[in-house]
Structures are given as C-alpha cells and as structure tokens.
Image (cartoon, coloured by chain):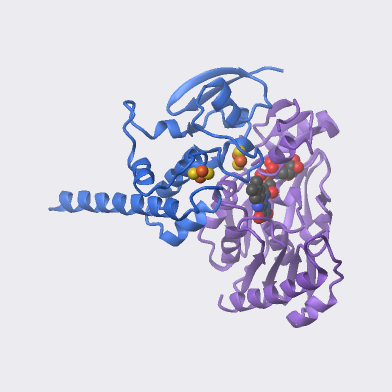
Amino acid sequence: MIQLIELTVNGERHDLAIEPRRTLVDVLRHDLGLTGTHVGCEHGICGACTVLVDGAPARACLLFAAQVEGAEIRTVESLAEPDGTLNDLQRCFSEHHGLQCGFCTPGMLMLAEGYLAEEPEATKEEIREVVASNLCRCTGYQTIVEAIDDCASRRRAAFQDQLDRSTA
Amino acid sequence: MKPAAFTYHRARTTAGAVGLLTELGDDAKVIAGGQSLVAMMNFRLARPEHLVDITHVEGLAGIRRDGDSLRLGALTTHRAVEKADLGDFAVLSRAMRWVGHLPIRTRGTVGGSIAHADAAAEWCLLAVLLDARIRAEGPSGVREIRAVDFFRGPFTTALQPDELIVEVVFPRPAPRAALTEYADRRGDFALVAAAVDLDADRVVLGGVAPTPVLVERAGTAEEIAGALELRDEPGISAHYRRGLVRTLVQRARKEASRG
Ligand SMILES: Cc1cc2nc3c(=O)[nH]c(=O)nc-3n(C[C@H](O)[C@H](O)[C@H](O)COP(=O)(O)OP(=O)(O)OC[C@H]3O[C@@H](n4cnc5c(N)ncnc54)[C@H](O)[C@@H]3O)c2cc1C
Ligand code: FES
Ligand code: FES
C-alpha cells in the first residue's frame, strides 16, 4: 500500500508517495537521492546511517519515514556550505585524519554534530564513549576522537571570544 | 534486510491506540521508539500486518514526581531519563548509560523496553528492583500490574495484545541503589547485569534466567552467585557467569553505598 507523507529534510519539504515499510535511510537514499547517509547493518549496530531527528542523533535504519513526519531531519549534506566549503567539524576530521575509507564518516559527523550541540562542554572521555556507538573499521577511533575534541575546543574558544568582545 | 509490508496507523490518543489494537487483533503491533521492533522487522523475525504508531500521542512522554513516587510516561526516552535530575531516584538516570548507545537512547522508550521484556534489559531489572507498577490501558480501562508479576518468560509479559503501557510508576525513592553490568562490547545487552537496593535489601540479576531474577533478603555476593542454577552455554561457561554475578553484585553494592 502506498502512503503519502511529507518529510522535512535539511530544511526542505518533500511530498512523497511511499510504502510504509520504507525506512528513513531508504527514503533518504532512494527517494531523495541523498546518498551521503550510508547504510550498513540495518539493525542499529553500525551507526553508518546516523542522522539528526529534531537535533538528536538517531539510527535512520530503525525508523520508518512515516514516523518522523513533522520532524526536522538533518543529514550530512547539510553540513557544508552550498558552494562545497566544509564546515568546522568536517575540516577537523580532515586535519586530524579522522577518516580513511570514509564509509563511517557521515554517521560519525552527524553523531558528533548532534552531540556537541547538546553538550558543548563534552570532555574527551565523554566523546570517546559517544563515538563507541558507531563502527569504524579503518581509523582505530583515536583520530576521530581527536577531531571531535578539537572542534569542540575551537567552538568553545570562539564562543568565549564572542563573549569577551560583547562585554569589552 | 527489508521489513515485510504492513499498514501504518497513527494513533493520536491512548484510547485511539487501544481501539485500533482491539479492532486489528493479533495482526497488529504497537511501535514506540522502534529500537527493538524495527530491527526485528528488518530481520523478518517480526512481520506484523499492522503497526500502530503511538509516538504522536500527546502526553505519553514525561517524568513527574508525585509525592513519594516517580511516574514515567511510556514514551519517555532513555535519554530524557539520563539527562533528568531525579534526586533520590538518581539510580534511574545513572543506569541509562548502560542502555545501548546515545542514538539508541534518543529514540528508545521506557514503555517499549518493559513491553519488549528482554531479561537483561536495564528497565526490566530496575522495575523489579524498585517494585514498579506498570499501568496498562485496555478496552475496559487502566489496570496496574506489579513488575514482579509482569515478566512471564523470555520476551513474554502479562500484557494483553489489546493493551498499551501508558505509565510506569516507581513507588518509593531509592537513594542507595545502583545498577552495573558487563558485556563484551560497550553498549551491547549485558551478559550479566546486577541491580541492588541496599535499603530494601534486594538484588535483581539480569542475564541469568529467562526473566529478571529477584533475590530478597539477599546474602553475600558469594551466596547469591552460589545459589543460581546456571548452565554452560556456547562461549560462556556457568563458572564464568557465576563469577560475573559475584563481582557485579559486589560492585553494585559498593556504588550504591556511595549514594
Ligand atoms: C544497537 C542496540 C543496542 C541496544 N542495547 C540495549 C541495552 O543494552 N539495553 C536495553 O535495555 N535495550 C537495548 N536496546 C533496545 C532499546 O533499549 C529499545 O529502546 C527497547 O528495547 C524498546 O523500546 P522502543 O521504544 O524502541 O520499543 P519498540 O521497538 O517500538 O517496541 C518494542 C516492543 O514493545 C512493544 N511496545 C512498545 N511500546 C509499547 C507500549 N507503550 N505498550 C505496549 N507495547 C509496547 C512493541 O509492540 C514491541 O513489541 C538496544 C537496541 C539497539 C538497536
Ligand atoms: S545501518 Fe543503521 S545502524 Fe547500521
Ligand atoms: S574510515 Fe573506514 S570505516 Fe571509518
């Protein structure tokens, strides 16, 4: 049976006619062509499909698209500028070699993006714990933790700078 | 894999959800966070013909202090509990770090965990430990089931197919309680989990039987571990599991005594 749903992805509204059994990750990839979000295990273990649902990291393979009608979905495609300029988190991944084959990277980026927005003061240990939710077969995680930690410190410094300036 | 086809129904009220469950009968299943159900559907271990989505029901999520008791709406996520400041119920928040990983906890719900009834699930252990009441709404109204009577077997509960868990009520504060566990990989379901409440002198164990095991007037960790009937299983001997029980009970007691 086909169902009509309205999905908001990266700020854009889409009207879709899909089967209810379509998971969010399949809708993103097959119906919307947003293939930045990867898919690995389809049972919640690998985290390759991690996206943000109303700001919170979630497994897109464990959600039916019909369930998240009305929610704000964000995928890895939302991070860079329209002209392709990488955002600060992506630049940190690049600088710290937080990726090799890149298969896990979109999921890692969205996990970190959602987590840092909620916990800007996160410690390196806390970041390590959170990153354990996604599998990476290449890097050994160290460089991913460093990339996220560095991005968090830079964001904190920038925020402090802003405060200092506004009170000066 | 991909799930089998089904018809999607979105409930707006608990009465609406119960109405749908009554009408659709055995072919229907409730979906909350989907963190257990969708994985099972992707594996085709579950093939419901109808899904009743309760995530859009108003008022089913939330944490409320009510005198001595703490009331958790069925749709309250693991993450919401983890982040809440629960005072003398802090054992609940602290235990959440053991439930899967962050992206699982942002979606998975208290009601879903209890209904799913994995014998190693943290919520099932905590419910038995703290004598929680599970409030279930059915066609003839709401009834309350004590957690000890709720879990009947592996993934089997006292819930009827046309009933919905609406709330889980923890009747008394537990300032000196703790849960700890061991799994080979961080975030996996526990091989063994132990939860203790020093004031009530209760211990609950997960991963040692088809349902959480309650030990009242608990003795030493050695005695508790010694009294369990355990069998050798592929990859994990009874001896090893018994050792885990002993260590984890000790560890949980130490943590609980720190408050
Ligand atoms: C990688 C991974 C690791 C995990 N690790 C753990 C872990 O360590 N510990 C742990 O406890 N859990 C773990 N989980 C499972 C997770 O906690 C789930 O959130 C939980 O088991 C089910 O909650 P849910 O809201 O997602 O329910 P769903 O998946 O939506 O539903 C589960 C079952 O409960 C029924 N149901 C749901 N809500 C209700 C209701 N209100 N009334 C009646 N029936 C209802 C459904 O019909 C279904 O049968 C893990 C999951 C994944 C994917
Ligand atoms: S594809 Fe979703 S967690 Fe692996
Ligand atoms: S970079 Fe290859 S899986 Fe992480």
Q: Is residue A18 above or below residue B18?
A: above
- Looking at the picture, how far across and down is residue A141, in whole percent? 48, 53
For residue B109, say whether it is visible.
Answer: no
Quadrant of the rendered structure where residue B11 is? top right
Residue in the foreground of this view, choosing between B56 and A156: A156
For residue B157, say whether it is visible.
Answer: yes
- Left or right side of B35 for B19: right
Quadrant of the rendered structure where residue B27 is? top right
Q: Quadrant of the N terminus of chain B?
A: top right
**In the figure, what tint was chain B given?**
purple
Q: Is residue B154 above or below residue B89?
A: above
Q: Quadrant of the C terminus of chain B?
A: bottom right
Q: Residue at x 68, y 17 (%)?
A: A2
Q: Residue at x 75, y 83 (%)?
A: B220
Q: Residue furthest left?
A: A168
Residue in the foreground of this view, choosing between B41 and B214: B41
Q: Residue at x 74, y 80 (%)?
A: B221
- Looking at the picture, how far across and down is residue A51, in whole percent? 51, 37
- Looking at the picture, how far across and down is residue B147, in whole percent? 77, 59
Q: Is residue A58 above or below residue B229?
A: above
**Chain given the colour blue:** A
Q: Residue at x 32, y 42 (%)?
A: A88
- Looking at the picture, how far across and down is residue A26, in whole percent? 60, 28
Query: How many numbered marks does the figure carry?
Result: 0
Residue in the foreground of this view, choosing between B75 and A164: A164
- Left or right side of A87 for A25: right
